[in-house]
Image (spheres, rainbow, N blue to C red):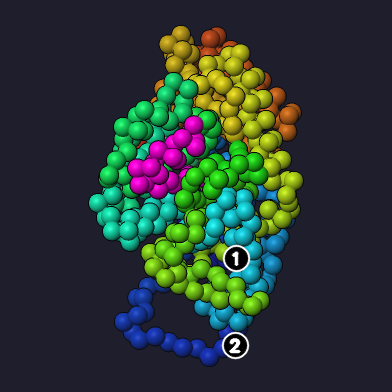
Amino acid sequence: MKLLFERSRTGRYESILPPCDVEEVTFEEKYLRSEAPRLPEIAEVDLGRHYTELAKETHGVNNGFYPLGSCTMKYNPRINEETAALPGFTGLHPLQGEKSVQGALKLLADTEKLLAEITGMDRLTFQPAAGAHGEYTGLLLIRKYHQMQGHPERNEIIVPDSAHGTNPASASMAGFKVVAVPSDEKGGVDLDALRAAVGEKTAGLMLTNPNTLGIFDPNILAITEIVHAAGGLCYYDGANMNAIMGHVRPGDMGFDCMHLNLHKTFSTPHGGGGPGSGPVGCKAFLADYLPEPVVKEEAGAYHLEKPAHSIGKVRSFYGNFLVVVKALTYILMLGREGIPAASENAVLNANYLMHQLKADYDVAYADICQHEFVLDLSRLKEETGISAMDVAKRSIDFGIHPPTMYFPLIVHEALMLEPTETESRESLDHAAEIFHTIHEEAVSEPEKLHQAPHTTMIGRPDEVAAARNPVLRYRWEA
Ligand SMILES: *Cc1c(COP(=O)(O)O)cnc(C)c1O
């Protein structure tokens, strides 16, 4: 496929600008570029075809099944886009005075209240732009808390080995030392190992629950108690709230702060589909440290204010405001009954698919799962030479987005599947059939799988090189 730059022909254009009807200003010589920028020149029809061609090569939630574990690739309802596109929202400027944006501030305050209800937290900030950014922000709250208590020496964060990979990374970015604790044979936190890990240096624990094995830790109350008794705080990675929302609340399980991924659980698009939002919630005793500004309601009017001991800003202005509009739309559309029903169906779908795949594949920790489950393909690899990578690549040929591969790290040859609640029973049955076919091929025609995918422009890129040396700029020839 040709790039826009390669399709460019001098003199082609797709729009005619109206004559300039405002006063022309010119800048000082030193600010002016010496040559016109080399932009592609292309006619509208060719531009349209270019993007359509690109779209055809792309797989998204609107193309087909997308069981990317841990990512909660659920359907993004159209009505979310409609509300977020209302001119009253899109025309706002972040520097407008409080008086002229009362509706927007009310929207932030209302969403905060609803999310506080869902999570059991007291206050939230919408500043963080992603889940990992939320983790970082929550950890800064924990750090600030210990500093204010006169315990700056508490600099260790305990992270179970079944946590999401971003957890240890965020803890270390926030300046903490990461202490890993292993999982027990059922995939939960090993309580004895946790008891041995806590101490006077413990700042807190970060827990992904349900964890990356799709397991809700049955000892959750004991875990938060052990950490609190040692003087630490408990951080909940709530990116996976899709399994539990409307049923249990991190705030009731003893967690002091947490983040949510609006771009997962609350149905806003992600992965190239749009900016994210990772709001952080906390209990009242941490609220004074939240990033500024927070919205405060007083006698029917809304104000922005700086919390007394704020950690400062973690992003400009108020976060990704329009993403909050979409999430609020989703919450209001589902309502009190719909929120828990969505979780129930997410869990049901995951268990339904897991049960079907069990006939061909080994499931790591095969109890009842939450929103996702992990296949362990070690035995398949031993017997046929077919790896998790081969199976994932082959699924592309059947119109399925590959599951998450080689994660979590504690399972070898892992494939992690998360169907989400928005997949119908027919889609799940169809996916199960495809994975069954792939398993048959692994035995009968392994070479076909080693070479997969066969239907895409690029099959097996050098992923390390692509990540380390991405070519993001077009180099014009001469
Ligand atoms: C997705 C995810 C994150 C990170 O969220 P980003 O928005 O990608 O930064 C953190 N924890 C868990 C459990 C997740 O699934």
Q: Is mark 2 within 8 Å of ligand 1?
A: no
Q: Residue at x 63, y 29 (%)?
A: 350
Q: Nearer the viewer, residue 187 or 469?
A: 187
Question: For mark 2, does the 10 Å Cα neighbourhood hold few (<14), some (14 to 19), or many (20 or more) residues?
Answer: few
Residue 297 locus on image (x, y percent)? 60, 73
Viewer-side label of 2, 1 = 1
Question: For mark 1, does the 10 Å Cα neighbourhood hold few (<14), some (14 to 19), or many (20 or more) residues?
Answer: many
Residue 351 locus on image (x, y percent)? 63, 26
Q: Which residue is mark 1?
A: 108
CA gap, disc 2 and disc 1: 38 Å
Q: Residue at x 28, y 49 (%)?
A: 154
Q: Is 98 situated left or right of 205 in this image?
A: right
In the rendered image, the residue lying farthest to the bottom is 23
Q: Residue at x 70, y 62 (%)?
A: 83
Number of marks in the rendered image: 2
Q: Which residue is mark 2?
A: 21
Of pointers 2 and 1, the one earlier in the residue sequence: 2
Q: Are marks 2 and 1 in contact (CB under 8 Å)?
A: no
**Residue type for callout 1:** Leu
Q: Which residues are magenta?
A: 219-239
For numbered disc 1, what is the local secondary structure?
A: helix
Q: Is residue 273 magenta?
A: no
**Residue type for callout 2:** Asp
Q: Is 477 situated left or right of 285 in this image?
A: left
Q: Residue at x 35, y 75 (%)?
A: 34
Do we see residue 469 in this rendering? no
Q: Nearer the viewer, residue 14 or 236?
A: 236
In the rendered image, the residue lying farthest to the left is 153
